[in-house]
Image (cartoon, coloured by chain):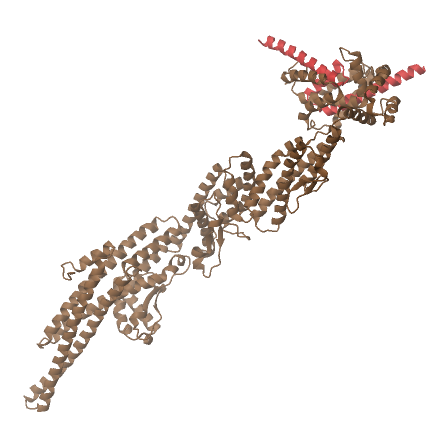
Chain colours: A brown, B red
Amino acid sequence: MNSSGLGDSGVTIPELILRLCSHLSKADQALTTKLYQIAISFIEQSNGSPSVDDEFVVPEIRTLLSSRRDPKDVDTFETLYSKIDNSSILHQKNAIFSFLLKTARVNSSKDSFKMKLIQNFEKLPHSQSALSSKSQTTVHSTPSQESIRHLYQGNLNDRPFSRSSRNESTTNSNIIGSVWSRQEFSSSVSKATNLSLIGEVDLLQDVIYSLQGIEGRFIKKEPGGHGFVIDQKNGRNFTPIQKGLTTRLLGLSFLHNKLKHYCEENDKQRGTMSQALISVVRDELSTYYKTVALLQAGMKKHGCAEHSEMSLRRALYVIQDHTSRFEWLAYIAEECNDKKGGALVTEIHGYLQHGSACVQEISEKVLTSVCKPLYIMLSRWLLDGEINDPYNEFFIEARSINTSERLWHDKYHVKKSMVPSFISMDQAKKILATGKSINFLRQICKDNGQLSGRESLQKFFKSTTAEALFAPEQSLQFHTTLENVYRETSLRVLDLLKNKYRLLEHLHSLRRYLLLGQGDFIRHLLELLAPELNKPAQDIYGHTLKTILESAIRVTNAQFEDEDTLQRLNVSFMGYSQGDTGWDVFSLIYIVDGPVSTIFQPTMPTYQCLFGALWKAKRMEFVLANLRKQQITISKLFKYNQELPPVMHIFHVLTSEMIHFLHQTQYYFLFEVLECSWAEMLGKVNHAECLDDIIQAHSQFLFSVQAGVLLDEKSKHLFSQLRSIYNFVLNLEAHQETLYLAASNEHEAEMTYRKKQECTNEFGLTLDDELKTKERIAKFRHLLNSIKATVKCLAQTYKTFVKNYLKTLSSSSNMNLQLLSVRLSFNDYYSVT
Amino acid sequence: MSSSTKLSQIKEAKETFQALMEISKLLGTGLDVETLSICVRLCEAGVNPEVLATVVRELKKEVGSTSDEAASGSTQV
């Protein structure tokens, strides 16, 4: 390092000191040892770092020189300094200059005059040892010293002590000497500007007061505001330059007061993020106070106004940095005054894109600190699913819920206004889902196992700070980690639901029993229930139906079903009103509990509706099958009766029409609606990535089935038409029942009559009997005629209804419904005219 | 090449030292050539300049007092 000729790297500090001592003591051995001891003790005592004001050394030398002698010396110094500055030999230039300055000061305080005089008068080409010639020069220079002093004596008549003190001794008048010499010079140099300079120092003191929010002599508080103004009366002597500078300085005091006021005002305000903002402001204020203290110290450094390093200009320079920072802090504080939480973060994040580096720096500082609470909340939420947010600042809020099934749906929400701008809505939803899943696992599934993927997140939170949320590179890492954790947690939930809580089995059971997938069971149940359900609703008892349900299970394939599933199956009644039959109120239900109820519980009413519609269609099918059966019985039983077949023919035709209609409708419901939607849902459920996917697929399935079986809002009129068509079926059933009863009565009567006839060989028949028979036959014929007419009419109306229905179907926007209409009238039987 | 650079270095060092000496004179430090050169080396070696200044002052004081004593002693004798 010290490869120059000046600093020999081989020589150590002690050696150098030893050399110095021996040089000073002029090779006196005893004295050298003594000096060496003194020197070492001094160096050891203050083993500190070099003084802080290194950069001020050169300017200080300049001021020292300029205050002492003619400006020529300063110029000489400048040339020498530039020479040294350019040389590469010295490495510790500042240290050397500082040393020189210090030594000079020590000497000047002792005998500055003397040294100068020596140099001035003797003009020695080489410096001589000041020490050795000390006493000598003092004696020699005394007369000249006197004469020189006379030159400066102008305004010093009021200081008689100075002369005597200087005459007394040169060694122990250090302090007085220094004071004396300084005042003497400064007063001679700046006599003319004395008044305004003193004014400037006082003004500067006032400005420093005002920077701390205190009123001074010249600077008073602005009435009703935060700022300061120059006092009209006391400040009228200031020059325009001073006024201008002061006004610029006072701008900062205004900002300081404003920020201080903001801190005090919002201190009571709750909210961790607002507190974080305040803490940054306070932090900034305390560095500012440090600067103000330095200003003050700089002013007092020499204890004397004229030599103070501070001037208004200098102060302006020193506080410049703070001014711009304060401006933006105040602006940010103003903007964020009525905001909290995420909204505050968003607001500050906006400043990060500002073009000014200063603004960027300050807003980044603020943002980092404001994000800290958010960061902690976020890590708590993602790691433990806990919300610790007493002041509603987090962008996920928890609401109270009534039932545990609603936890997934209702408990947690994203508050849009609180989402910080560096987190997109999509990510916010993922964050929500992750925490929600954790809560779901813990609270609903009672699964307290270690969650996979936690470690990476924990590591991430440990290794980063709040900056990671918004700093571009780190936030990328944050988002990928988030993505992973989200996926892992969701998969864990799905895994648990599918395997432990048998989600798919539940879906299958629902389809089998509530959506009538298990045909044999439903058919049998219908058959068993029919007599019971024909009763008025109030006469039906749940336990009877339950028994019937159980017997239906026992005899059909449903008995091989899982025990658990069968346990969940039950019958229920909806609320009934006067005149309702059992058909109107009966419904099959499937009880789900535990975690899967999160998916199924909200959809249960929909399942009931669907069951109602499908059950009705099934019942019609059943009724029609019975009708056909009865018709065959009638034709076999009463084949001798010549009057029945024409009536029965009408029945036949109408029943066939109805059967065709119902078959097509059923086909459509079962195959085109249910099966297709089911297949679609199964695919989605198998590929689901999170619980929400399943919930969505499931509700979509239900929705499409609902639309398919004409239960949704759009096809309400279609369903009412369908219902009236069903009513025709029921009407026909009633008519056929009447007919059947009448026919069998007639048949019985006829049989009795014939028997009587055969037994008595026409002799036992009285006129009365014959009359009665005739009357009976006429009555029966009459009934037949009336039924024929009614059914003919029924058939007619039925046809119109179906035609209308088909018309509506074909005009429907749904392609499948149009196709259904085509299929229903495939041979243009119901040609729509 | 190395010798020429060394030569120029020495020259430069000499010039620099002369300049330093001039400044020292300007400032009136009262240091002689030898003392200054040692002090510059010490500074280069990383000694705190403030402390060094104090040390030099103290040493001079010490030397002065001993020499005074010696002088007074000799006059008495």
Pick the front one: A697 or A284: A284
Pick the front one: A52 or A4: A52
Against A96, residue A576 (above or below) is below
Image quadrant occupied by the N terminus of chain B = top right
Q: Position of residue A125 (x, y in %)?
A: 75, 10
Against A698, residue A232 (above or below) is above
Residue at image position (44%, 50%) is A433
Which quadrant holds residue A702? bottom left
Q: Is residue A628 visible?
A: no
Which quadrant holds residue A205? top right
Residue at image position (13%, 80%) is A782
- Is A7 on the left-hand or right-hand side of A128? left
Q: Position of residue A711 (x, y in %)?
A: 30, 61
Q: Residue furthest right?
A: B77
- Is A326 on the left-hand or right-hand side of A622? right
Q: Position of residue A755 (x, y in %)?
A: 10, 85
Q: Position of residue A445 (x, y in %)?
A: 44, 55
Residue at image position (64%, 42%) is A227
Against A91, residue A398 (above or below) is below
Q: Is residue A321 visible?
A: yes
**Total marks placed:** 0
Pick the front one: B60 or A2: B60
Image quadrant occupied by the C terminus of chain B = top right
- Is A391 on the left-hand or right-hand side of A110? left
